[in-house]
Image (cartoon, rainbow, N blue to C red):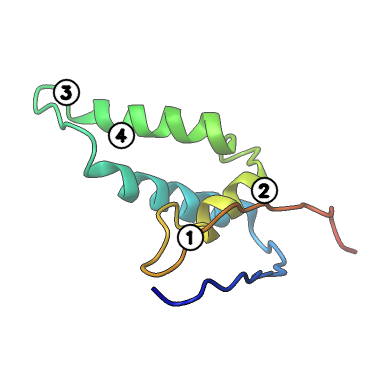
Amino acid sequence: MADMTSASVTLYVEVLDAQAMWDHAHNAYALAHLDHKIHDEAQPTRLASELLAEFVSLCGTREQPDIGDCLRMIFDPGESPPGILIEDSSAKVEGPRS
């Protein structure tokens, strides 16, 4: 095994449309979880409702998104890529810019 190397990756972003960001984060969340859910043919909307409720508990509503949690959902892939161990991630919201 090769020697391990520690590194840090920092992204600075400007959120131009919080609802579009929320939509993207929700889509990423739903796609990542679909393989682990059982679809009930008798209630086709049940899965969508369940995923939405889980996502809202993590990232807030579309009207009032938790910007930091949505950004983590978008940029932290959850499962570490091959050869990498993601130890932690964080997102700090600095507030509106004028």
* Residue drawn at point x = 45 percent, y = 57 percent: 77
Residue occupying the far top of the picture = 42
| Tag 4 and tag 1, C-beta contact below 8 Å | no
Which amino acid, mark 4? Ala
The quarter holding residue 82 reads bottom left
Q: Could you say whether the residue bearing mark 1 is in a helix, strand or loop? A: loop
Sequence order check, earlier mark of 2 and 3: 3
Which amino acid, mark 3? Gln
Sequence order check, earlier mark of 4 and 3: 3
Front label number (4 vs 2): 2
Q: Is residue 21 left or right of residue 1?
A: right
Sequence order check, earlier mark of 1 and 3: 3
How packed is label 3: few (under 14 Cα within 10 Å), some, or many (20 or more)?
few
How packed is label 2: few (under 14 Cα within 10 Å), some, or many (20 or more)?
many
* Residue drawn at point x = 54 percent, y = 34 percent: 58
| Tag 1 and tag 2, C-beta contact below 8 Å | no
Q: Quadrant of the N terminus?
A: bottom left
The quarter holding residue 20 reads bottom right
**Residue under circle 2?**
67
Question: What's the distance in space between the residues labelled 4 and 2, CA to CA?
Answer: 22 Å
Which percent across, then down, holds residue 64? 66, 38
- In the picture, the disc for residue 48 is 4
Q: Could you say whether the residue bearing mark 4 is in a helix, strand or loop? A: helix
Q: Could you say whether the residue bearing mark 2 is in a helix, strand or loop? A: helix
**Residue under circle 1?**
85
Question: What's the distance in space between the residues labelled 4 and 1, CA to CA?
Answer: 31 Å
**Residue under circle 3?**
43
